[in-house]
Amino acid sequence: MILAWAKKKWSWLAVAALIIFLALVPFKWFLGQYTSIMIFVGISTMITVGLCMLMGYTGQVSLGQAAFYGLGAYFSAVLSKTHGLNPWLAMVIAAIATGTFAYIIGYPIFRLRGNYLAMATLGIGLIMWTLFNQMVQFTGGPDGMSGIPYLSIGGFSFDTSFKRYFLVWFFCLAILFLSQNIVRSRTGRALRAIHGNEAAAESLGINVTQFKVKIFVLSAVYASLAGSLFAHHLRHVSPQSFDFLASVKLVVMAVIGGLASIWGAIFGAGTTRFLSDEVLLGFNKFPQLDIIIYGLILMLVMILMPEGLFVAIKSGTMWLKINWRDLPAIMKRMKKDFPEQVKYFLSRLPLARLWRKTEP
Amino acid sequence: MSADQFVQYLMSGLTQGSIYALIGLGFTIIYSVTQIINFAQGEFVMLGGMLSYVLAVEAGLPVPLALIIAILIAAGVGALMYILAIRTARRASVISLIIITIGAAIFIRGIAGNQFGVNAVSPTPFTGRGSISFLGAYIEPQALWIIGITFLVTILLYLFLSHTMVGKALRACAVNPEAASLVGINTKAMALIAFIIAAAIGGIGGVVIAPMAMASYGMGVMLGLKGFVAAAVGGFMSPIATVIGGIMLGIIESLAVGFNWGPFTSAYKDVIALVVLLLILLIRSGKLAAAERAA
């Protein structure tokens, strides 16, 4: 009875379990030592979700997403520190300004497709990075700016990592739920139609450019909010966080999580963050290892499982869950009924050459 | 700006533009044969530059030998990239191919940073560091090497494409890959050749620019982007237009910095190139989109 109910509602149970897990992470007796990394995972997830909606659902590339992240961070930093505005107000203004900027550049840019769009967004990312570096009187130049105030509600200041963890993940989960609803709505279906075939979508009365720009603006606003949280968390912003590699890192996160997967973004951001901040830190003697591994991940995932690692693991385990009892029988029948095809399939596997000697 | 200064900036623009032209040629060759934009194109330039320093200065090889080995290694990396990453994913979508070549780019960059260090290096110029006076401007001999070699590469490439069997086969693939394979042209081999030529040209660019502008493991992105601008002028199909586009971009950049007017200071030099890129893309968007659909 309970089991049947659980089977029916398993996706909600999974989300509930995730939220309980996330709520427990910052406590010392659980995974307290990872609080600060998990804050960054939350921030990265927010941007990655936007990128997933843009790349996976709408089929449009952005190689300059770090530009919007940086705009959010710098707007927040300049308004709240230099001009002494309330940090919350600064955050809202930053989001509106970044969204407006994305809207203005969105219309001309989305006249471009595929490769040209990718290069144009890459170019915008590099322009913003150059401006962050060069507009020293506003941004502090390459050294960046420090002393950005913490966010606070009334007298309650988010002045410890423990408090900010909950703040960041509140925003992050809100964005995840919002995105899930958008993807499942009429808009989401329109986006998938655009991804499938633009001409067909247009003929069904979908305003293709308008939808692309809308999602672009949405992803920019997500990135801007993430940037504001980043600025008020670290209290220091500098251009290095928003360079070309930052944009590529975001693509890595989206690719690991699965381009068309909302909840995969947490997995992608988490894997990438832990890889660079925990696992690879031990390899001091092998500099640049993180970049090398990101490059490998991008190539391997796109060649072997273009839907993304998370989706591949998910569908793989689903298939096994359904079929594991019958696996030997299935293999036997396949070998009997389609000997040629099985042989061909086995020979096409990447490591086929190794076992061909033992099993002709 | 006096006339002397004008010539000075013009010459430095011509030098810089020659490099953009070489990188742009790489984009054009690969795109016309395979319809792939190779986002790793700038990394071949970086490899050429870094390797020429490592081989000539650190390993102490004679300079001409070091340069040739550097170019050959860059070409080899191009071949490996095609065989390992591109050919295994031939049916991939445009997005997948973009991500794959970006992955290859940062992979190459990471390996270079790991092996050669992250500091900028400056190999010795081919023929000394003096300067030659020309119409009131002072020109480094290396600049003449750069312009001369770009000219030579362009001519050789033209002769190769128009007068050899392989070159004609490459052009056939560019016009119509299916028809080309019907008349017995091995399109996969042609794609491999395109990657090798593009990587070699990139390597040549790196080898000649490094003594003047220094080389570092992270130089690839910006140079690749500027080469892309050059290739966009030619619609990724015309080598001649690509060379003209690259040289124009170099001169625009250099003169804009030279006028030193308003926002056009040297700090924003790269921004100028990027704005030119966006303008070209937007002006040509209709034509480029049509080419994309036809491909």
Image (cartoon, grey):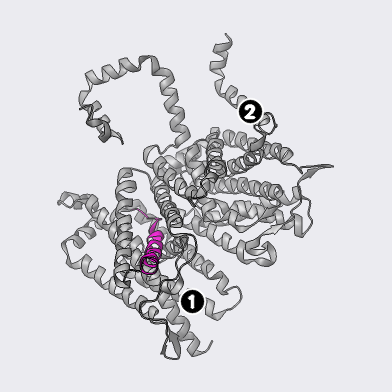
Marks 1 and 2, how far apart at CA: 57 Å
> Is A237 contained in the magenta span?
no
**Amino acid marked by disc 1:** Ser
Instruction: Please provide percent x and percent y for residue A159.
Output: 77, 44
Q: Going by the picture, which residue comes out furthest to the top?
A: A1
User: Which secondary structure dominates the residues rendered in magenta?
Assistant: helix
Q: Are marks 1 and 2 in contact (CB under 8 Å)?
A: no
Mark 2 packing: few (<14 Cα in 10 Å), some, or many (20+)? few
- State the residue at coordinates (23%, 28%): A358
Could you tell me which secondary element the residue under label 1 belongs to?
helix
Compared across the picture, whether B17 is left or right of A281 comes to: left
Which disc, if any, is residue A83? Answer: none
Closer to the camera in the image, A145 or A353: A353
Q: Chain of mark 1?
A: B
The residue labelled by disc 1 is: B254
| Amino acid type assigned to the residue bearing label 2 in the image | Phe
Asked if residue A53 is positioned above or below residue B3 in the image, the reply reads above
The residue drawn where x is 62% and y is 63% is A142
The residue lying at 76 percent from left, 56 percent from top is A81
Residue B29 visible in the snapshot: no
Please tell me whether residue B195 is drawn above or below residue B245 in the rendered image. Answer: above
Horizontal arrangement in the rendering, residue A278 relative to residue A351 (left or right): right
**Is B45 within the magenta?**
yes
Secondary structure of the residue carrying numbered label 2: helix
What residue does disc 2 label? A21
Q: Position of residue A7 (x, y in %)?
A: 53, 16
Say yes or no: labels 1 and 2 on the same chain.
no
Number of numbered labels in the structure image: 2
Crowd tier of the residue under label 1, counting other residues whose Cα lies within 10 Å: few below 14, some 14–19, many 20 or above = many
Answer with left or right where residue B221 lies relative to residue A69: left
Which segment did they paint magenta? B36-58
